[in-house]
Image: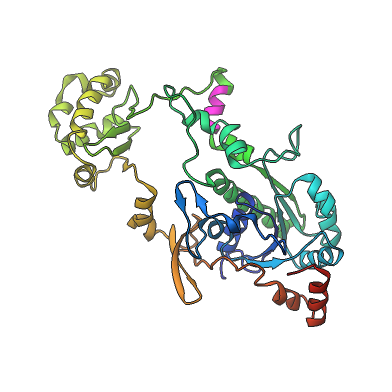
């Protein structure tokens, strides 16, 4: 594939979504990503067929496609001597080694930094972890629900203060996907430095660190005040000093999301569009200061007005309005959103004569949607890669007989 990462080879020894998602982003950008899978089990997610209430049927596997499109699959048992030798042969031709294996496993399998650098001193070594490479929890495992969502305050910061429970992540692999994009950015920076200086870095990204960054403004506020972030109650909430920031319920149980931080600037036109022009003429809202002081009264009127019509009515009424608003959409609506399609956030993938749509990573280069390749079939590229490395069929047969490859 063409792209800014064309000519870069990434050797990926990872499972699940967080770190493989980084490989998918790099593949989107044109890198040759070689995914190592165990000859008997493969990536554990290949068998995942239940996502929440959705049962996946047929050949499609959304979670695998999301994190593994565009890669090559090599089935290799690196715990065997022959398998480890082949892994190091691939490493010698690679620019990046990407892994989420825990420290003890990396040491046991001889795939730690020193092992890879012995084969290729110039390789960028990238590790994704739950809690980072330092501190007492450096060796602990975890998923995005624990490291990103729970421990980094995303769950607490998203849970309304008046409900009994905790709000889950918006969807499967939510923190993993954000984290994978972050890993890809860190690798790109390390490759840029290596190109300029010749120095190859070790890159570390944790789900905890990504989560702390995502909640960074609220955490910074806690650093200043010593107070935890206070969430709003459940329901359609509006900022108490600005009637144009928050959520309004529509007649059909949907919601409008408003984010007009300069509320007074847009207030008159918004009132006109929703059919309450007299509200903007009310002397209680005649200045920015008065609107802020009396926002509760404007909110009461706007709640009743917006709640009297369905979402489709307000989409039409606010079409072309300069103020910042959006409908609160479902994932099915996002999949059909023409703006999403126009910007290449979802693209069509060709696979063995058929086609399907898939979410793309969110960076455009030269205003051109990315061209994605499908995820690889298990072990599909093992033999060809060995031949590309200069091996022959005798070596392939020997590796198969020893159990090093599938």
Is the magenta region chiefly helix, strand or loop?
helix
Q: Tell which of 20 and 266 is nearer to you.
A: 20
Q: Is residue 303 above or below residue 2?
A: above
Q: Tell which of 271 and 127 is nearer to you.
A: 127
Q: Tell me which corner region of the image, top left, top right, bottom left or bottom right, holds residue 315.
A: top left
Q: Tell me which corner region of the image, top left, top right, bottom left or bottom right, holds residue 338.
A: bottom left
Residue 320 x/y as whole percent: 24, 48
Q: Quadrant of the C terminus?
A: bottom right
Residue drawn at the location 75% of the way across and 51% of the way down = 201
Q: Tell which of 60 and 2 is nearer to you.
A: 60
Q: Magenta stretch?
A: 216-222
Residue 66 x/y as whole percent: 53, 57
Residue 46 x/y as whole percent: 60, 59
Residue drawn at the location 46% of the way across and 41% of the way down = 170
Q: Is residue 391 left or right of residue 30?
A: right
Answer whether residue 219 is magenta in the image. yes
Q: Tell me which corner region of the image, top left, top right, bottom left or bottom right, holds residue 253.
A: top left
Picture colour scheme:
rainbow
Q: Is residue 225 above or below residue 195?
A: above
Residue 362 x/y as whole percent: 49, 54
Answer whether residue 263 is magenta in the image. no
């Amino acid at each position: 594939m063409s792209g800014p990462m064309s000519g870069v080879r990434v050797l990926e020894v990872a499972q699940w979504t967080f770190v493989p998602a980084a490989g998918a982003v790099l593949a989107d950008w044109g890198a040759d990503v070689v995914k190592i899978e165990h000859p008997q089990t493969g990536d554990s997610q290949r068998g995942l067929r239940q996502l929440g209430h959705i049962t996946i049927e047929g050949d499609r596997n959304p979670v695998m496609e999301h994190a593994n499109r565009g890669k090559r699959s090599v089935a290799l048992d690196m715990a065997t001597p022959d398998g480890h030798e082949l892994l190091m042969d691939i490493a010698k031709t690679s620019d990046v080694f990407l892994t989420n294996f825990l420290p003890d496993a990396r040491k046991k399998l001889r795939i730690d930094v020193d092992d890879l650098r012995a084969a290729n001193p110039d390789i960028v070594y990238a590790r994704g972890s739950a809690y980072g490479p330092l501190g007492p929890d450096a060796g602990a495992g975890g998923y995005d629900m624990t490291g990103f969502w729970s421990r980094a305050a995303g769950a607490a910061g998203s849970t309304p203060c008046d409900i009994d429970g905790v709000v889950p992540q918006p969807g499967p692999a939510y923190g993993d996907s954000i984290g994978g994009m972050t890993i890809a950015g860190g690798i790109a920076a390390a490759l840029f430095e290596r190109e300029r200086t010749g120095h190859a870095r070790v890159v570390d990204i944790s789900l905890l660190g990504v989560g702390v960054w995502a909640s960074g403004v609220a955490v910074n506020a806690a650093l200043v005040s010593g107070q935890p972030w206070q969430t709003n109650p459940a329901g359609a909430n509006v900022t108490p000093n600005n009637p144009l920031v928050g959520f309004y319920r529509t007649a059909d149980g949907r919601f409008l999301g408003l984010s007009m931080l300069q509320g007074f600037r847009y207030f008159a036109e918004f009132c006109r569009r929703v059919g309450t022009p007299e509200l903007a003429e009310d002397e209680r809202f005649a200045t920015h200061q008065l609107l802020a002081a009396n926002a509760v009264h404007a909110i009461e009127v706007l709640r009743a007005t917006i709640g009297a019509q369905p979402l489709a009515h307000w989409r039409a009424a606010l079409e072309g309005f300069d103020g910042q608003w959006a409908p609160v959409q479902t994932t099915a609506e996002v999949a059909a959103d023409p703006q999403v399609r126009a910007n290449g956030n979802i693209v069509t993938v060709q696979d063995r004569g058929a086609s399907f749509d898939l979410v793309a990573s969110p960076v455009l280069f030269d205003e051109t949607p990315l061209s994605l390749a499908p995820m690889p079939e298990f072990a599909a590229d093992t033999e060809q890669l060995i031949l590309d490395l200069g091996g022959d069929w005798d070596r392939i047969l020997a590796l198969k007989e020893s159990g090093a490859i599938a």
